[in-house]
Amino acid sequence: MILLVLCFAGMRGEPVPQVFENQDKLHHLAGFACLTVSAFFAFPGTRLIWLLVWPLVGSMLIELEQSLMPLRTASLGDMVANALGFLCGMAVIFAWRKYQTIKLKKLTRVGIVER
């Protein structure tokens, strides 16, 4: 669902109206952070390298597509915001994995979970 929203917003004929300057960068960052985290939970067996490759390739394709539209422009700043969103998503994933490891160690010590 998040991927569909990103594609729809990225491929619209006109940009989303902005309330404040560079609001679109916030949209890019939040969108790609959510995409990265949701992809991790949707496909838990996926190697983390693919969580890097596919969102960044998608980001480049959307920006390339925007460069071909009359009312849109491709932006290096948008691609940087997408990459930062990806990094924020990865930070959430690593924090989640660390939390799960600590939780499992506690449960193992208490004897609830056996190795």
Image: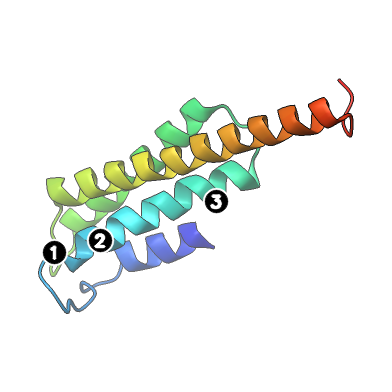
| Label 1, residues with CA under 10 Å away: few <14, some 14-19, many ≥20 | few
In the rendered image, residue 34, in percent from the top left (x then y), is placed at 45, 54
Q: What is the number of the mark on residue 26?
A: 2
In the rendered image, residue 112, in percent from the top left (x then y), is placed at 89, 34
| Label 2, residues with CA under 10 Å away: few <14, some 14-19, many ≥20 | few
Q: Is residue 14 rendered to the left or right of residue 52?
A: left
Image quarter of the N terminus: bottom right
Q: Amino acid at mark 3?
A: Ser
Give the secondary structure at mark 3: helix
Residue bearing mark 3: 38
Q: Amino acid at mark 1?
A: Asn
Q: Relative to residue 37, is residue 105 depicted above or below?
A: above
Q: Are marks 1 and 2 in contact (CB under 8 Å)?
A: yes
Q: Amino acid at mark 2?
A: Leu
Q: Relative to residue 69, is residue 74 depicted above or below?
A: above
| Label 3, residues with CA under 10 Å away: few <14, some 14-19, many ≥20 | some
Q: Is residue 77 rendered to the left or right of residue 47?
A: left
For the residues labelled 1 and 2, the Cα–Cα distance comes to 7 Å
